[in-house]
Structures are given as C-alpha cells and as structure tokens.
Image: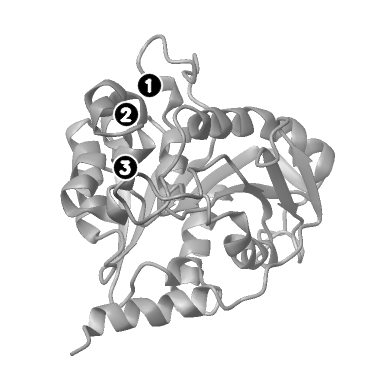
Amino acid sequence: MTDPAVERDAAESASAFSHPPIEPDASAGYGEHPDQVVDFYAPRVGTASGDARGTAPLVVLLHGGAWRAPYDRQHVTPLADFLARRGFAVANVEYRRGSSLPHQGGGDPVAGRWPETFDDVAAAMDALPGLATEALPQADVRRIVVTGHSAGGHLALWAAARHVLPEGSPWRLPAPPPLRGVVALAPIADFAVAERLGVCGGASAQLLGGRRYWDERLPYADPAALLPTGIATAVVQGRDDIVVPEEVAEAYVAAAAKAGELVGLTLLDGVGHFPLIDPAADACAVVAEEISQLAW
C-alpha cells in the first residue's frame, strides 16, 4: 500500500523538475573552479515598484539538493526566470558540492565539501556586488535579498550570519553584510534537529566532514547557532514537507526568539518541499511576495 504523503511528494518533485532550464542573460566567474560561477537574469518587465531609478533589487538565489554534486543550479533556473518576470534582477549562484560517488556504507553521494562549500558561498557573496554591476546594470546592489531552498536555504541563512561566526573563522565579516534580508525556503536551518530526523540521509553531518567533526565545526555552520544576526529574515515552509519537515524550521525560529531576534515564519497548508521552487505552483507566488516585502 502506497503512502499518500510519499505520492504527493513525488508528484510535487516531478512538477518542479519538469520545467526546461532557462538560459541566463549573462554569467561571470568568482573563482577558477568550474563551479565558481554566477548566472544573471535581467528583469523581464519594468521594475515591480515603478522605480524611477530604472533599477531592480538583486535576488541572490542559492539552490538546494542536500549539498550533493548531482544537484546543480540548473534545476532552479525556472525559479530564477519566474523572479525575473516579477521584476527582480537575479543572481543564480553555483558552488562546490559533495562527491558524485556514495560515501562508504551509504547509498547517496556525499553531501558538501568542507571547507570548499563555505569558501565558495562566502567568495560569491563578497564578489557579487562587483560582478552584478558589470554583468547586469539593471541590478541595484544596494538592495540585495538572499534566498535559497532546502540546503540552499541553509546557505542563505549562513551567508547573512557571517558577522557572528566565531572569532578566527576565515569566513567571518567585521560587520553585517549589506543585505535587505533573507528568505529561506524549507531551509535545513537547525542541524541538530535535522540530524535527529534523518533529513536527506544525514547530509548535515556529511557537510561538516562526518560525525567526528560535529562538535568542532557545528558552531561555524549551523544557522541555529549563529543568532542573532540583526538582518530581516523570513522562513517559508510547507506544512506537508516530508523532505525537510516543519519541525526543522520551527526549531530555528525558536532559537531565534530565544536569542532575541524576530524571524517571520510562513507555514503553507497542503504544501510539501518542492512547490516553493515550482513556478507552476501557487506557493512560488508566496515566495515572490515574501522577497518583495524585503526588497522594495
């Protein structure tokens, strides 16, 4: 007998991945590795607010896929195009992910690389204002919102928290990054809860290099440990998500409240993991609205 939740998740995944990739308007590298690249999408219509400056807020998009190599930025190009058609400039960031081969004793490819995954996100965020100014003149780099889905939601939260990383971290910023805010979509936002629930086959521990590094590296990587940031943050979560369950987002929001930070949480009934990045789903319009509230 089939599980209705599993069937729904499979249907939602199939819909989200059914859209053909959308070619960018421009691309630029932020390093020498082939994965150190950003694709830019120009606003498809006039700016959503009728901005007299003729520029649009820049949405930095970090894709998900459990930090694993088989999942790259191509699967969120329809979302990038969707946001561009809403009047945003979009930067779709690639970064180094885990091996394409399963780890010993496991059936899935290894999740993430330590420290390369974090090296890349930090380098991309630092380079983006300059890259966008040159590649996409329509982008207003004074109005940047970072968004990401699943593992990308984790990276979006982490990118906004670099100024509260432990002293001595190579990724630490001396001051908060110049962001309008973060919109995290079903993020892997609390590693302890994610591991307890077995999210993505233990991907959080793999990202840190394995369980033996958990205690040492968790303070440098877990968004729930990097609070408060002082940066406006919104989390969008489907109540019926069986990939990254609602409990993970709620744990992060609880940690934020305990730290004295206010984080918005939008819970969508009847929505699983993948409609948040599916332009054919109503949930995607909710995502665009959450971004708009921070960007304009």
Q: Which tag is nearer the camera, tag 3 or tag 1?
A: 3
Mark toward the start of the polypeptide (3 vs 2): 3
The secondary element bearing badge 1 is classed as: helix
Can I make out residue 281 in this image? no
Q: Which mark identifies residue 226?
A: 2
Horizontal placement of 79 versus 53: left or right? left
The secondary element bearing badge 3 is classed as: helix
What residue occupies the far front of the structure in this picture? 104
As displayed, is residue 158 above or below residue 68? Answer: above
What residue appears at the point 46 percent right and 35 percent down from the top-left corner? Answer: 113
Q: Which mark identifies residue 204?
A: 3
Can I make out residue 78 in this image? yes
Q: Residues within 10 Å of mark 2 (few under 14, many from 20)?
A: many
What residue appears at the point 78 percent right and 47 percent down from the top-left corner? Answer: 27
Is mark 2 in CB contact (under 8 Å) with mark 1?
A: yes
Q: Residues within 10 Å of mark 3 (few under 14, many from 20)?
A: many
